[in-house]
Image (spheres, helix red, strand yellow):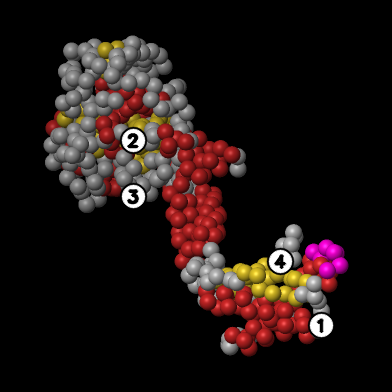
Amino acid sequence: MTIEDFFRLLLRNAMLLIIALVLGAGLGYGYSYTKSPVYQATALGFVRDASGAGAAAGVDTSTTQYSKAQFYLPLFGTRAVGQSIVDELGLQADPDGIAGSLQAALNPNAAIITVTASADTPQHASDIANTAIGAVAAEADKLEPGTGSQLVAYQTALVPGAPVSPDRTRFAAIGAGIGLLLGLGFAWLRNRNDSRIRTVEDIRTSIAVPSLGVLPEAKDLGRDKNSVLRDPQQFQSREALRKLRTNLRYADVDNPPRSVVVTSSAPGEGKSTVAANLARVLARAGQRTLLIDADLRRPVEATQFGLDGSVGLSQLLAGGVQLSEVLQKDPKSRLMVLPAGEVPPNPSELLGSRRMHELVATLTPEFFVIIDAPPLLAVTDAQLLARHTDGAIIVAVPGRTRVEGMTRAVESIRAVGGTVFGAVMNRASSSRLTRLAYGDAEYGYSAYGSTSRTYSYGYTGAQVDGPEGDIDTDAPVEDGLVPAPVTRESEPPSQRAGAVDADDAPRHRGRRAAAHPVDEDSAP
């Protein structure tokens, strides 16, 4: 793990680490209350020359006193001294424990002994420290009776006001450190086992499919409060859709796609809004585009475009209506929409039928067909539709879609002989913190321009885009008002290099039909 990876690990798990730190500190602080308080009191003893012989002879007695003080130090930790203290104070305690609670130190510059006593109450600590000096002096007289030096109390111990142990701050710091270490360990394990897709590189390496585009997490790429599809206004949103449109056109240079299934691995990943936005941006570029709502279980396209969805694909496949009766036009673009219609009891049978195959084959010479299909892992509808079209686009959401689900979705399409053009990352966060924590969803993806300025490419009114020569307009465009640009898709079939004439379309489409024959009994 590099330093950059470690830094991103900290950012991704910042909240977890903060919680672990605070929780550890709290537990450490609380644990300190399970420890009995310990009080300490300190008394001073002085070793003097009681005989006065040295002073009378004019001899410096400090060396003798200091040497004698060193003799007294070991006596503070003896059982005899502990027993004397217990007997004098009337304590119900072990003499060895009392002696072990005493700490004695000699001042390096004078014959002064500092005695520190520890006890469970302030008064006991003071009494033990004061008594210890006399007990050691008495024990020394027993060992060396008649000596000229003796230990006397120099400064009595005061009653301590607060315990010296437990140190609650220290316990809290230790708990915080342990909590932080555990949090880092958990974060590392979670990061190691995280199989969610985060960046374009994850799609290329883990799923082994191309990335067709990255759509930012923006309100204008979704629906309003009435569930109607918004018209993108932000530069970032509009440019992301144009990039997706361009990449789709070059998904297969030798055989450009004319029909595409837009699906996802799981529900709630925005495949319907992606399909609708892609269809609209294609239509505004002058491409004759048809959006088919083939999600016969949860149709939303009619609502997104504010159209009547009571009659549509299900009745058309059942033979109840004609194609001209169900096609509707988006009032904000040149896009044609085929709603789902009534929810049938047998969606999979209808979408896998010969009628659906023939419908797509009939429409592709006239339109660029985009089909909104149900999620792949939920039902088999998208697999069946992939057999009727040139290929599929799978929508993924960074931080939500998992590699396992995406891989199974790709394999399910390829299992029926379908083609996966690539994946589209939807709702990619453009915040700086998210890019630092997880890496850019796509390198160089962040904002390049702004809607507050008009660039030479033209993003307002009916202006011509850059190198593709696409026409884009914010106002409703009627057929014939703005001429379609000359592109590979908009050229007449007879003039398109390597193209198939409209009369030859059935033979052209027959290559896919031969590869994936449709059962005669599957037709409704």
Between label 4 and label 3, give the one nearer the viewer. 4
Do the numbered discs 1 and 3 sit on residues whose CB atoms are within 8 Å? no
Do the numbered discs 2 and 1 sit on residues whose CB atoms are within 8 Å? no
Kindly identify which residue carries mark 4. Answer: 112
Q: Residue 443 versus residue 209: which sits nearer the camera?
A: 443
Displayed quadrant of residue 239: top left
Dot 2 or dot 3: first in sequence order is: 2
Between label 2 and label 3, give the one nearer the viewer. 2
Kindly identify which residue carries mark 3. Answer: 379
| Residue depicted at x 48% and y 70% | 33
Query: Which amino acid type is shown beneath numbered disc 2?
Result: Glu
Dominant SS of magenta comes to loop
| Residue depicted at x 85% and y 64% | 58
Disc 2 versus disc 1: distance between alpha carbons?
95 Å
| Residue depicted at x 72% and y 83% | 138
Disc 1 versus disc 3: distance between alpha carbons?
105 Å
Kindly identify which residue carries mark 1. Answer: 146
Query: Which amino acid type is shown beneath numbered disc 1?
Result: Gly
Q: Helix or strand or loop: what does disc 2 sit on?
A: loop
Between label 4 and label 1, give the one nearer the viewer. 1
Does 366 appear above or below 124?
above
Could you say where residue 124 lies in the image, as x and y percent from the top left? Answer: 55, 78
Q: Helix or strand or loop: what does disc 3 sit on?
A: loop
Kindly identify which residue carries mark 2. Answer: 217
Crowdedness near tag 4: few (<14), some (14–19) or many (≥20) residues, C-alpha within 10 Å: many
Query: Which amino acid type is shown beneath numbered disc 3?
Result: Val
Start-end of magenta stretch: 56-62
